[in-house]
Amino acid sequence: MESLLQEFLNYLVIEKNVSDHTLANYEKNICRFLAYLEDALHKNDRIKEDKTRQRKSHLQQAKQPFPFYEASRTQAIAVLNEVKPVVIRGYMGQLQKNKLSKNTIAAHLSAIRAFYRYLCREEIVKNNPAAVVATPKKDLKLPEFLYYQDVEKLLDPVSVDWVTARDLALLEVIYSSGLRVSEAVALDMGDIDMQQKTIRVLGKGNKERIVPIGGPALERLQTYLEKLGREAEIFPQRGDAIFLNKQGKRITDRSVRTILNKYMQAAGLPQHISPHALRHSFATHLLEGGADLRAVQEYLGHSSLSTTQIYTHVTKTRMKAVYDKTHPRA
């Protein structure tokens, strides 16, 4: 079982180019499903091992033995071929009893489907039992966003050193071009076209797109790069990465949240907002300004228009709030 799971994870990295975060979620969700299979399919015939070792990552954290995980490849394939849709529905029912949200349950089902789809492709199993299991209808959760006046407060500080310049340039670029945090921190020097005012972005699934970048963001970038250039002796081998930490290495996704919290606090804004809210704000403000939904879809790199349409709900909600607040007979 270990080899099958590892082969699938390698496939996700090499062929699907998934992010580390996505990879960790797939591994965690599939490990949880395999643990359920052990209980569901082998209640009276557990695989016995003289010495049970634990999964080093997620299963070790749960501190529960998982002998099924150590089954031989032949045993594992036999078990996986036994799984019927009813077993997967039972698993989803258990997740529901554990009070997981519909969105989380849907993510678990998606991971199982992908795992079986890979096994079918490699002719390891015959059928994908998850393919006929209906996905729970996801809860509509409106994305968080900042009003434009709040964005102005957030991005108002003056750059006093290269670190401040980096922070403001990073936040400005995310908002200006609607980038995911992972896309922003992955930017290299060659991805920015100052003349054409565009950014080349490598998004989910290794899909490349070209997005515009605004004048204020370019100014922030230029200020940052000028200040960083004066620190050349500190970072002699910094490579092509644009946004660096104090060790001269590429900044991490987690650092962006810390940076945003710092400037949200300084601006007197709520600190529960995630960095992704800047991307949501980008889309919301474009649509409120009259942008075409298809264009916003292209900017965001959404494969489906239905994903982008959630922002129309946000704008309608705000329009109603503005109406209620300002109309004398609302």
Image (cartoon, rainbow, N blue to C red):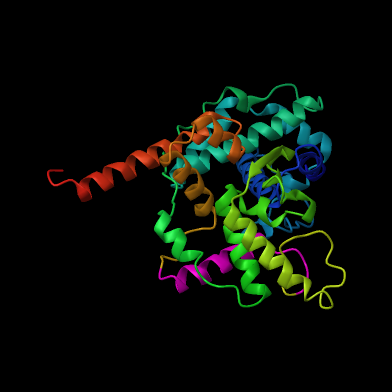
Give the farthest residue toward the right: 237
Give the magenta-colored segment's residue range.
247-268
Q: Position of residue 199 (x, y in %)?
A: 69, 47
Task: Please say if 88 is above or below 32.
Answer: above
Which quadrant is the N terminus positioned in? top right
Residue depicted at x 39% and y 42%: 314
Q: Give the residue drawn at x 70%, y 30%.
A: 116
At 44% across and 51% down in the image, what residue appears?
144
Q: Is residue 259 above or below residue 45?
A: below
Image x and y of residue 147, in percent: 40, 54
Q: Position of residue 65 (x, y in %)?
A: 68, 55
Predominant secondary structure in magenta?
helix
Nearest the viewer among 183 and 290 is 290
> 26 or 278: which is nearer to us?
278
Which quadrant of the view contains residue 3?
top right
Residue 217 lies in magenta, yes or no? no
Name the residue nearer the viewer: 208 or 7: 208
Q: Is residue 170 left or right of residue 92?
A: right
Q: Please tell me in which quadrant of the rendered image residue 205 appears.
A: top right
> As drawn, which residue projects farthest toward the left?
329
Position in image of residue 121 (x %, y %): 78, 25
